[in-house]
Image (spheres, rainbow, N blue to C red):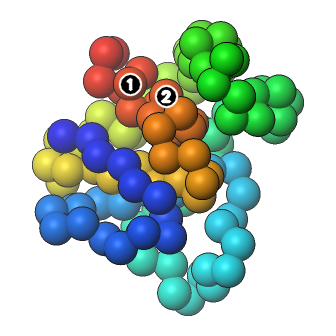
């Protein structure tokens, strides 16, 4: 199972393995206080795509399509996510965006669940 939550929100029961999937380290969180197992910044949308999207709901479908194109070149990382999910049962994707529905973690989760 793949879950997701904002990195600033309280951990939910059953979060077995947590991965930060943002390009940039979240503001206000020291590396010593980080409560996740891994940071996979390479899986995040490109800086250009992230800036273009800017959490504009009108651009959501196009953002997902363009992000899927970027992900198609990262098969090794995608396989790693699949292995982590199998090994740990629950994989939690962490993101820092204030947008809790239309964000890169949601797009990545959708992609992983369909693949």
- Verify CB contact (< 8 Å) between mark 1 and mark 2: yes
Left/right placement of residue 62 relative to residue 104 reads: right
Nearest to the observer: residue 80 or residue 23: 23
Nearest to the observer: residue 7 or residue 60: 60
Residue 42 visible somewhere in the drawing: yes
Mark 1 surroundings within 10 Å by alpha-carbon count, few (fewer than 14), some (14 through 19), many (20 or more): some
What is the residue that sits farthest to the bottom in this orientation?
32
Left/right placement of residue 28 relative to residue 106 reads: right
Mark 2 surroundings within 10 Å by alpha-carbon count, few (fewer than 14), some (14 through 19), many (20 or more): some
Quadrant in which the C terminus is drawn:
top left
Residue 46 visible somewhere in the drawing: no
Quadrant in which the N terminus is drawn:
top left
Q: Which mark is residue 110?
A: 1
Give the residue displayed 62% in from the left and 80% down from the top.
29
| Quadrant in which residue 30 is drawn | bottom right
Nearest to the observer: residue 28 or residue 30: 28
Nearest to the observer: residue 14 or residue 78: 14
Q: Position of residue 4 (x, y in %)?
A: 36, 49
Q: Which mark is residue 38?
A: none
| Residue tagged 2 | 107
Give the residue displayed 29% in from the left and 24% down from the top.
113
State the CA–CA distance, disc 1 to disc 2: 5 Å
Give the residue displayed 72% in from the left and 57% down from the top.
24
């Amino acid at each position: 199972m793949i879950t997701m939550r904002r990195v600033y929100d309280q951990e939910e029961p059953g979060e077995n393995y947590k991965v930060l999937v943002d390009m940039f380290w979240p503001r206000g969180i020291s590396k010593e206080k980080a409560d996740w197992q891994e940071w996979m910044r390479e899986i995040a949308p490109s800086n250009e795509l992230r800036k273009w999207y800017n959490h504009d709901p009108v651009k959501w479908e196009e953002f997902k399509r363009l992000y899927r194109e970027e992900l198609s070149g990262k098969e090794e990382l995608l396989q790693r996510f699949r292995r982590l999910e199998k090994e740990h049962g629950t994989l939690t994707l962490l993101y820092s965006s204030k947008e809790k529905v239309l964000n890169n973690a949601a797009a990545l989760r959708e992609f992983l669940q369909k693949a």
